[in-house]
């Protein structure tokens, strides 16, 4: 799994992880005529938390266009969801869930530790996969169950 430092190296625009943002704003992606940028709140406590917020903001860089701060508009909600989904799939891909299974990692806390993400981010990722696929999906030779979270290997 990539560390926060490794993920930072993938940022190709102006980036500041010590921005003086309001307490409630953990991160923001800004498009402007002078250049695009990602800012993270300097009050984030851990690199794990910074990594999760950074992945979502990178999702905005790759998947959103324009000012989507007005979340009462359906189009903006859809763009927000696409950005978050990009971040979820970047840090918690289905392959990583299978890797955790093979490493005999059990429980959400241990899986989050194994993937180096917050438990909140892991849960949001699993919830998104459940909304996208239903109760389970088949990936390669595995059935990945989302509620409860589990993996079963398919033998032919």
Image: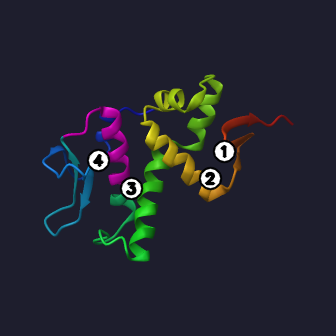
Task: Give the Cα distance between marks 1 and 4.
Answer: 34 Å
> N-terminal of the two: label 1 or label 3?
3
Q: Which residue is mark 1?
A: 147
**How dense is the environment of label 1, judged by Cα within 10 Å: few (below 14), some, or many (20 and up)?**
few
Q: Which residues are magenta?
A: 43-59
x 68%, y 55%: residue:
134
Q: Which residue is mark 3?
A: 59
Q: Is residue 70 above or below residue 149?
A: below
Q: Are marks 1 and 3 in contact (CB under 8 Å)?
A: no
Q: Are marks 2 and 1 in contact (CB under 8 Å)?
A: yes
* Kind of element beneath mark 1: loop
**How dense is the environment of label 3, judged by Cα within 10 Å: few (below 14), some, or many (20 and up)?**
many
Residue 44 can be seen in this image:
yes
Residue 6 can be seen in this image:
no
Q: Pick out the residue farthest to the front.
A: 24
Q: Is residue 74 above or below residue 90?
A: below
Q: Which residue is mark 2?
A: 130
**How dense is the environment of label 2, judged by Cα within 10 Å: few (below 14), some, or many (20 and up)?**
some
Q: Position of residue 73 (x, y in %)?
A: 39, 77
Q: Which residue is mark 4?
A: 11
Q: Quadrant for the C terminus, please.
A: top right
State the residue in front, 71 or 82: 71
**How dense is the environment of label 4, judged by Cα within 10 Å: few (below 14), some, or many (20 and up)?**
some
> N-terminal of the two: label 2 or label 4?
4
Task: Give the Cα distance between marks 2 and 3.
Answer: 20 Å
Task: Give the Cα distance between marks 1 and 3.
Answer: 26 Å
Indicate which disc residue 139 carries. Answer: none
């Amino acid at each position: 799994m990539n560390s926060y430092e490794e993920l930072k190296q993938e940022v190709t625009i102006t980036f500041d992880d010590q921005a003086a943002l309001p307490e409630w704003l953990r991160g923001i992606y800004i498009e402007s005529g002078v250049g695009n940028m990602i800012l993270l709140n300097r009050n984030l406590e851990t690199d794990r938390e910074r990594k999760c917020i950074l992945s979502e903001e990178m999702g905005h860089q790759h998947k959103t266009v324009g000012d989507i701060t007005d979340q009462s508009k359906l189009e903006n909600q859809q763009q927000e969801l696409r950005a978050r989904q990009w971040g979820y799939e970047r840090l918690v891909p289905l392959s990583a869930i299978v890797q955790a299974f093979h490493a005999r990692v059990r429980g959400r806390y241990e899986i989050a530790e194994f993937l180096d993400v917050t438990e909140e981010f892991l849960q949001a990722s699993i919830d998104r996969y459940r909304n996208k696929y239903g109760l389970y999906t088949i990936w390669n030779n595995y059935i990945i169950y989302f509620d409860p979270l589990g993996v079963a290997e398919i033998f032919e």
